[in-house]
Amino acid sequence: MMKLLERDSFLHQLDVALKEAIAGQGRVALVSGEAGIGKTSLVEHFTRAHQDSVRVLWGACDSLFTPRPLGPLHDIAMQLEGQLPTLLNSNADRQAIFSACLVELQNRPTIVVFEDVHWADEATLDLIKFLGRRIQRTPSLFILTYRDDELSAEHPLRLVLGDLSRAATNRLQLLPLSESSVFTLARAADQTERAHKLFDTTGGNPFFVTEALASKDTGVPSTVRDAVLARAARLSLSARAVLEAAAVIGLRAEPWLLSNIVGAESVNVEECIAAGMLQSQGDNYAFRHELARQAILESISPQRKLTLHRMTLAALKESPETHKDLARLANHAEGTKDVSAVLEYAPAAAQQASAATSHREAIALYELTLRFADSLPPDEHARMLEAYIFELVFANRAADTVIGLKKAIELWHSIGDRPMEGDKLALLTQACYMIGQKAEAEQASQSAITILEELPPSAALARAYRGRCFIRMEDRDCAEAVIWGEKAIPLAERFEDTDTLASAYNYMGCAMMVIDYERGRELMERSLTIARGANLPFALAGTLANLSQMLVELYQFADVERYLAEGIAYTTEHDDDYHLQGMLTLRALVHLYEGRWTEANEILLKVLQTLNVTLNVDTTIHTYALWALGRLRVRQGDSASLAMLHEALALSIQVDAIPRLGPTRAARAEAAWLTSNNDLAIEEARAVYDIAVSKGHPWIAGELAFWRWRAGDDFSPPTWIAKPFALQIAGDWRGAAEEWEKRGCPYERAMALMDGDEAAQLAALEIFERLGAKPAIDKLKQKMRAQGMRGVPRGPRPATRENTFGLTAREMEVLANLVEGLSNNAIAKKLSLSTRTVEHHIASILQKMQVQSRNEAVVLALKENLILSE
């Protein structure tokens, strides 16, 4: 049975009501919501789940001008034998029919459904009242579905529902789906690119969502349109005129504005409300659903629609209440097809939206402007594009940024404005690189520098140097990146370009951290200071993200959390999804290395889910997220890991940058080694090893060297590779294990201990078991047996089996110290562990014992006699 989205609580309520009914306390369940909200789907799902144990009777009311009397009961009678069908067919009196129906519900446990009772005829309403008052005498659940948005104050159903016993009645009002569930449906239909717009236009109405997806049409699906228009067709001509005017006015229609457009016919708005087409929202009128409004809009003739837009625009411009509502004016300007009106209101509205940090709205308004911008002089057109590009950055629409910049460059070139052409080429450098167009980025950078160096020094030249610093840093050509950064910074200072200054320090600092860690940190802190002082949200977030990335890349996990915490909070507050997703990915990587694999998995799945519905996404975040999740799944033994790493490699090759290629190749080498495919492991590690060495990157080159060595490759790595890798390759497994423990990396520590004596290997096995690293466990056990070691555990270690909760021997030691009341630091000193390792053990203990605190763990341990108290 297919799972319903966001309906579990309602199904639970129905389950409880049914149990109470079967126990002899019959119940009524009122399932309400707007058309398409999923009332029928919910009830069908529920009845299918119980149809084998309980009788289900189902009837429906008709959407007819004259409903058939007792329509639901006639439907139900066709499912029965006995007195009730006979009475119905013999035109018996209503009391006899009602009594026979009650007897049917008293005879055996039953779920009886009356669907769409907002259309019920008077006799059916009387039957509902009759059964509702007596339902508690039956073992039956009586389910009524109805559209609560179609019940006026005078609707007869309201009186019936008000007469039902509160004690016996459950009210289930269904709500629209959340945005995440709409994304789920869109993904299932392979239409993720429509998810955001679909949620906005459907408001999460399940029927409208599914119909829109099924139609695969950008407009309103015909099935929805037909439903809306059928209801509208029942209106008088005057009421239809009001409805059309309201549709053109927009999401809300003020009474004064509606009256201004339709004149005396505005009195017919009550007819629209009574028919469920419009509703009162405060002092205004609104459609009950945006798709309904669109359906009415599509039915209006082009000429009539143009006239209504013109009348609306004129009225809005004249009113003191609305003449400053620029976005609304721009919308109706578009409807009039008046180029001058669009160019007057849309850009101003976009600036207004941007000032309020409503970047998505600003983008939409600039896109409206640009559709009419060909009539503008080239310089005005180009500046309009630049304003649009500025907004695109906040939406992470990198591909559109490239397109916009190229168009602006063409316009500046066409009028011979070399400074502006060079400046936009400098911006194009980074934009191209971010979407994997590395060759185009190099070309744009060289062209920008060539043009701008021929002109007097400028802030634009500083930006060109900064762009070159950026691509050199991204390639980890660190010495060159520092040179270009040192060129950019003085110029940015001279021309007081704080944004360029902050980002130049950022990029140069990233490069310097590889060369001189402390000096690089100083440069990054300088970037943060500048960005904070000048209130540059995007620059500040960028530096926090890059600093966090470099700390992870250099395995400096002790320092990274404070920057990630600040960055995630800051980007969330400033609606900066681009940097937020990047830093969430980095946090997941930290969790991966720290052995907190469950948390890492949850974060990465959410990030990838977000990226999968984001258009024109920067490939950097996607690559890192795929690589991180792929590596995690490799270590867990999940076969799906190889597909993730394959996709990550394809994205890495597209950009051809060692920070992406190196880790991805290393993860693939690890996957091959864990399956004893040493030749493939060597091939993967060799693929970019020489490049990593040429860059002088100690950690990337070091890990690739490690996997070459692990797989049995015969070579001599450089002496400057990262210390843990160098120590282990040199045979000092103890030193390597200590280095990894200092950095809080349990899996890597266990990999070092694998090469040690029996005690070290047993310690490694314990770590792998705690992490759930099945491939490494199998690999280590195989090695231990090959060495002739006896008593190699085939399942959980004996120490693990000896207690109820599956705690390892080391966890039992830590737990014993908790019972003694020792602090984390004291336990670490006593057991010769790092404090971080002790924290990991405690987290694992709490999880296995299913408790929330150290104190609860101690109490439970003593209760279960795991630890004997003195």
Image (cartoon, rainbow, N blue to C red):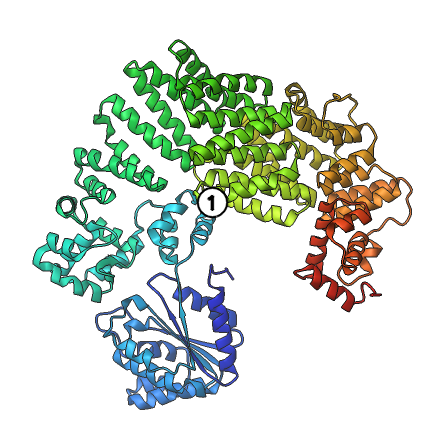
In the rendered image, is residue 387 in sight?
A: yes
Residue 449 location (% of width, % of height): 44, 14
Q: Which residue lies furthest to the left in this view?
A: 264
Residue 394 location (% of width, % of height): 41, 37
Element class at badge 1? helix
Determine the residue positioned at 81% across, 39% down.
753
Residue 147: quadrant of the picture: bottom left
In front of the other: 754 or 557: 557
From the viewer's perspective, is 483 left or right of 738? left
Q: Is residue 314 above or below residue 27?
A: above
Quadrant location of the C terminus? bottom right
Q: What residue type is labelled 1?
A: Thr
Q: In this view, does 534 lie above or below 161?
A: above
Determine the residue positioned at 47% across, 71% down.
47
In the rendered image, is residue 643 in sight?
A: no
Determine the residue positioned at 44% across, 86% down.
136
Determine the residue positioned at 50% across, 27% down.
436
From the viewer's perspective, is 658 left or right of 367? right
In front of the other: 273 or 749: 749
**Residue designated by label 1:** 572
